Image: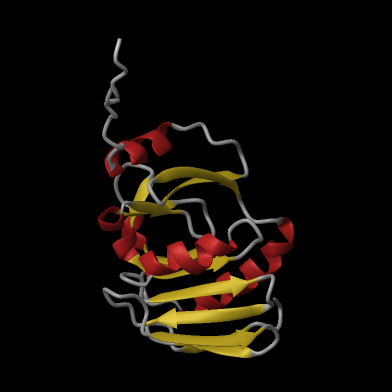
Amino acid sequence: MIERATPIEQAAPPTFEALLRTVEEMDTPDGFKAELIRGKIIVSPWSMRRYYLPMRALREQLGAHAPKGQVADIAPFLFQFPEAGRAYGPDLYVVDETAFEGEGRHLDAAALSLVAEFTSVSTKDVDWHEKLDVYGQLVPVHLVVDMQASEITCFSDPSPHGYRSRRTAPFGTSLPVPAPFDFDIDSSGF
């Protein structure tokens, strides 16, 4: 008998919509969130409790300067970026209130005016690369609060190739945030 290679038929990878439905049907444990990252469903814990005070300080500042009709929050919602095949649950976001109208569990990322990600050892790579690339094509302002490096970076001016502007400041100083916010973040409470 002569040995021959036998091709193995592989099913096509699941579509973005199929993955999104799977995330919606998941019974994610309390304190965890599921996101679509690089075509995979990733389940990770919400931020550690020591992150709460900096998140609250930032949320209060953003809420005071958010454009009319927008809300700053840390509630666990998934924002979908269908063109990129991604869906993220940012640590903090500012979004148009109309995004919450209607049914379903996932929101349209086009309604976002700002996202903020607080890095951890396990999420730092995704926050600084994967999410930055996707947010940088659509979301007007993106903040990376690097808890390990004790600094905050503001990205703005999105384009098809990513953000065109970047500013970084160490914790304890102020950082300008451009339109539609136009104020300086006070990071002394971080």
Residue at 69% over, 70% down: 148
Q: Quadrant of the rendered structure where residue 175 is?
A: bottom right
Q: Vertical placement of 45 versus 137: above or below? A: above
Q: Quadrant of the rendered structure where residue 111 is?
A: bottom left
Residue 77's spot in the image, x, y percent? Answer: 45, 51
Residue 84's spot in the image, x, y percent? Answer: 30, 57
Given the current orientation, which residue lies at the most extreme right position?
50
Q: Specify the quadrant that holds the N terminus.
A: top left
Say if residue 79 shows up in the picture: no
Q: Quadrant of the rendered structure where residue 79 is?
A: bottom left
Given the current orientation, which residue lies at the most extreme top position?
1
Residue 12's spot in the image, x, y percent? Answer: 26, 34
Q: Specify the quadrant that holds the C terminus.
A: bottom right
Residue 139's spot in the image, x, y percent? Answer: 36, 71
Number of numbered markers: 0
* Scheme of colours in the image: secondary structure
State the residue in front, 156 or 6.
6
Residue at 34% over, 82% down: 157
State the residue in front, 87 or 67.
87
Residue at 59% over, 63% down: 124
State the residue in front, 52 or 136.
136
Q: Is 39 on the left-hand or right-hand side of 9? A: right
Q: Vertical placement of 166 versus 33: above or below? A: below
Residue at 51% over, 87% down: 167
Say if residue 68 shows up in the picture: yes
Q: Vertical placement of 126 versus 164: above or below? A: above
